[in-house]
Image: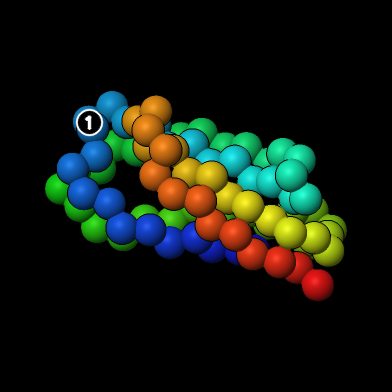
Amino acid sequence: TIYVFFDYRRAPPSAVLRHTWFRDGSSVYFSSEDFARDNGGTAFVTWAPEGGFQVGLYEVQVMLGGTPQFVANFEVR
């Protein structure tokens, strides 16, 4: 399982958290969930593919309330 932690503050009350995972430029996983949290804090997204991660370059794109928040990159060897 890969965990991507992030800090947030003042999330819109009806915000949706979306995260898309790419391997070597191709989308391999997508998730969307309600993010009903106020104030601020630390949150995270995760993914654990069946059979484990394949070798390659990965990118995780995180959006909150329709606004891009950040991109994280990592490599599996």
Depth order, front residue of 74/18? 74
Drawn side of residue 77 relative to residue 1, left or right: right
Q: Residues within 10 Å of mark 1 (few under 14, many from 20)?
A: few
The image position of residue 10, as x and y in percent, is 18, 43
In this rendering, the answer to whether 32 lies above or below 42 is: above
Q: Which of the 4 quarters of the picture holds residue 61?
A: top right
Depth order, front residue of 50/71? 71
**Residue at x 53% of width, y 57% of height:** 72
Residue 42 is at least partly visible in this image: yes
Q: Which of the 4 quarters of the picture holds residue 28?
A: top right
Q: Secondary structure at mark 1?
A: loop
Residue lying at the far left in this picture: please name it. Answer: 39
**Residue at x 24% of width, y 39% of height:** 11
- Colouring: rainbow
Q: Which residue is mark 1?
A: 13
Depth order, front residue of 41/56? 56
Count every numbered label the image shows and give the total.
1
**Residue at x 72% of width, y 39% of height:** 27
Query: Residue type at mark 1?
Result: Pro
Drawn side of residue 32 relative to residue 74, left or right: left
The image position of residue 9, as x and y in percent, is 21, 49
Depth order, front residue of 40/76? 76
The image position of residue 67, as x and y in percent, is 37, 33
Residue 34 is at least partly visible in this image: no
Quadrant of the image containing the C terminus: bottom right
Q: Which of the 4 quarters of the picture holds residue 69?
A: top left
Drawn side of residue 46 relative to residue 44, left or right: right
Quadrant of the image containing the N terminus: bottom right
**Residue at x 48% of width, y 44% of height:** 62
Residue lying at the far front in this picture: please name it. Answer: 25
The image position of residue 24, as x and y in percent, is 77, 50
